[in-house]
Structures are given as C-alpha cells and as structure tokens.
Amino acid sequence: MLFKNEMLYGLHDKPKVLHCINAALQHVMASFIGIITPTLIIASTLGLSAEIPYLISMALMVSGVSTFIQAKTIGPIGCGLIAVQGTSFTFISALLVAGLMVKEQGGSNDEILAIMFGICFWGAFVEIILSRFIGHLKSIITPLTTGIVITTIGITLIKVAITDMAGGFGVHDFGAVDNILLGFTVLVIVVALNTSKHPILRLSAIFLGMVIGCIIAWSQDLLSFDEMVAMPLFSFPQPFKYGFDFQLDVFIPVALVYFLSAIETSGDLTANSLFCNQPITGPKYIKRIKGGILGDGFNSLLAAVFNSFPNTTFGQNNAVIQMTGVASRHVGFYIAGLLVLLGLFPAIGAFIQLMPKAVLGGATLVMFATIAVAGVKILTTDTIDRRKSLIIATSLGLGLGVMMVPEALTQLPPQAANILSSSVTVAGFCAIIMSLLIPESNSQPSPSEI
C-alpha cells in the first residue's frame, strides 16, 4: 500500500495537464493490448477477419466511455476511481461456444455477432442486479475472498507478462535471446526510473521504458512499420450494426460468467482502493464496490449496444497507480479521451499495436506482480488462522492448478471445462463456497481440546 507521503497525487487532486497526459499515456499503454486482444482472439477464431478493424475500434471507444463513467460516477453508476475498463478475457470461452454453434449451423458473420452481442446485452443485467445486493453479501465480499481473487489475478497476469517477454504467444521465435534481452532491458529501465526521487521520471517510468524499448527494437530490426495494417481513416459507432438475437442455451454460461465478473471486479476495485489510500472496509467501501460493479454491468450493456464484448475493470492499471504514485481520478478523464481517440482513428491503434511484445512484457512484469503483492497485503490485514489458511491454500491450489495444467479439464463436458478453465473463476468460487461452509471459530480451543 502506498503511504500518503509516497503519493504524488491523491484521489481528488487535479494534476497539471502535462502530468495528466503523461500518466494517462502509461495507463493506455498498459491496457491497450489487453483491450483489443479478446476481440482479436474471438474474431480470428470465428473467421470474422473482415470485421476485426471495426470491432477493435468499438472496443477501444467503449472502453474510453466506460472508463469515464467509472471515474466520473453518474448517479449510482461508477466507483470514482481510476478504474480503467476494457474488454474482458473471462468471457472468451463462453462467447466462442456461442459463436461456433451459429457458425456450424451455417450462420453468416452478422448472425454470429448478433447472437453474441444479444446474449451479452441480456447477461449484463445479471451484474447490474447483483450490484444492488453487494451490501447484503458481506459473507462473500470479504478481505479473504477478495484477497484470494486479487492474488490469483496478479499471478495469472505474471504468466501473460513473461509470455510477452519471450516474444508473445504462438510466435516462431518464442524464447529467443533477443526477445528476453529486450524485455529485461525494459524491465531494468522501468525499475531504475521508478526509484528516482524526481517526480517526472517516476511518473514517466513505464512510458519511457516502452519508448526506449521500441527504439532499441527498431535499431535491431525487431520493429518494422511495413507491417501497418490497412485500416479505415475513421470509425463511426453504429448501435446494433450486426443485428440482435438471443438463444437460452448459450446465454446461461455467459450469465454465470457475469456473476463471476462481479466478484473479480470487487477484487480489482479493492486493490484500486488500497493503492489510492482509500478504505477497504466499511460503508464507504461497500458503496464504492456497488457503484463499480453497477458500472461494470452498465458498461457491458453499452458495449453490446455498440458492437463490443463485455467490459470489466482492468487489474493491470492498479499497478500503474502503484508505480507512478498518481491516484487522481482526474487522470481517468484523460485516459477515457485517449481511448476514444484511438477508437475513432484506428490507424493510431494499429501503430501502437506494432510494439514488440517483449517490450510490453518487460514494462508490465513488475506491474502485474504488484497486483499479486496487493492481494497478499489484503490477506494479511487480519490474522491468518487455521480456517483462513485452509481456504487460501485450497483456493489458490485449485485456481493456479487449472492455469498450470489446463489439460486436466479436457475430459469434462465442454461447458464445464469452459467455466473451470479460468483460474480466477475457480479460486473465487472455491473461496466463496468454503467461506460459507466452514464456520468461523469465535473462541480459541482450550489445551484439553487440542
């Protein structure tokens, strides 16, 4: 947790414009790949290549609007933090099941997208309704369950960062020495700049690390602008461009994922509150969590309307707050503006997309690991007794186990395998169920009872 004297800008401070832009750029750089990757995976798997440029633009644009809503708060909607919203990875498996079903039935691209956006639209109401009852679910939303979820999120993201440092998933030169050295160089630069006593250098650590990494990559012919993908100059949002459809059997898995997304969001927002020196217990905290989960649901509904997949709060941006010391929600407005700009002009996004994965991995490794550390801090805010130790061990064991050995789920029914393939889902559900089933002991056993 950041102490107040380590914070450059608090939650309600208004930094100078240049400082806001600098901090916002680092948030955008940290989240850009995460925002567009689920869309790329879903569209590529379903053979929707012709729709990819538009879908990416809408993903970025909706993320910008959603981030603004979370930072600004509109009535009960929003958490009032720098809670960067982006396309959720958690829904990929469930949406691919729906898309492949329509594709196997001979559905067109429009029909595939119509069914996916339709079930995402109605599924968003699961999270919206659930947000209203969070205050009554104190036995579920506890430091124990949220700490387990945050720790799992951080460890899962570490795997993503290391994969990027090695060159990125599926590349022919995965693990090449050039990739490892480039990623490690960026990592050292980010750490070195972040230890500086000069506020500007600390504020710019992640951004400068990425820029220097790109320059090094270009000098070594690891970065080429010849790969710029031809994209339209301007993308205009069009509600339900591909139509609107619904089917119950593929809706149920998506509805379940929305429930899990609410639990994951509560964890991310708890970490965000921790880094911003805001309370993580009490009425103010519960109100913030309710508004944030409601914002997630509303923003996912908005995403479905404007042809994008469900949004969630990005955990990696919590680490940017920790690394930069900038917690001002005012920065969230600048992040929102930059994301909308990237969405309106897809060529800008294509330019950023050229960044070598090794550079991104080097810049994000410490940030992602910081999220896991935040989870551990939350878990240790109270004494870890035998009950809590058992719940933590079992939840992390199962959650990280399915991440390390995904083949263990191959014999399960497809829908069950899709649900349980998420380490965050497994760890979160396990923590919740065990917390409810194993009673807390209010008294210490006497020596004769031991």
Image: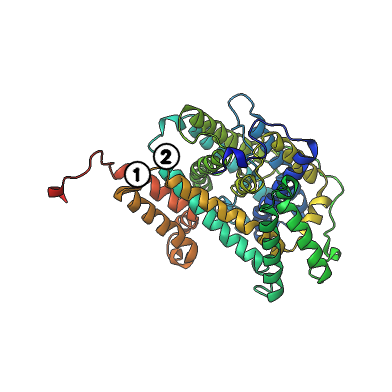
| x 47%, y 58%: residue | 417
Colour scheme of the rendered structure: rainbow
**One can see residue 96 in this view:** no
Answer with mark 2 or mark 1, whichever residue precedes in sequence: 2
Q: Nearer the viewer, mark 2 or mark 1?
A: 2
What x and y, as percent, mark residue 292? 57, 35
In depth, the one of 1 and 356 nearer the eye is 1
In depth, the one of 119 and 203 nearer the eye is 203
Figure quadrant of residue 399: bottom left
Q: Is residue 375 left or right of residue 82?
A: left
Helix, strand or loop under label 2: loop
Image: 38 above or below 282? below
Image: 224 above or below 272? below
What x and y, as percent, mark residue 187? 67, 61
Q: Quick one: label 2, few (<14), some, or many (20+) residues within 10 Å?
A: many
Residue type at mark 2 is Thr
In depth, the one of 248 and 405 nearer the eye is 405
Q: Is residue 140 left or right of residue 450?
A: right
What x and y, as percent, mark residue 345? 83, 46
| x 43%, y 47%: residue | 379
Q: Cβ–Cβ below 8 Å for labels 2 and 1?
A: yes
| x 46%, y 50%: residue | 376
Image: 309 above or below 11? below
Real-space Cα separation, disc 2 to disc 1, in angstroms: 9 Å
| x 53%, y 48%: residue | 250
Instruction: Find residue 435 and name its label.
Output: 1
Figure quadrant of residue 208: bottom right
Instruction: Find residue 243 and name its label.
Output: none
Q: Residue under circle 2?
A: 142
**One can see residue 288 in this view:** yes
Residue type at mark 1 is Ser
Helix, strand or loop under label 1: helix
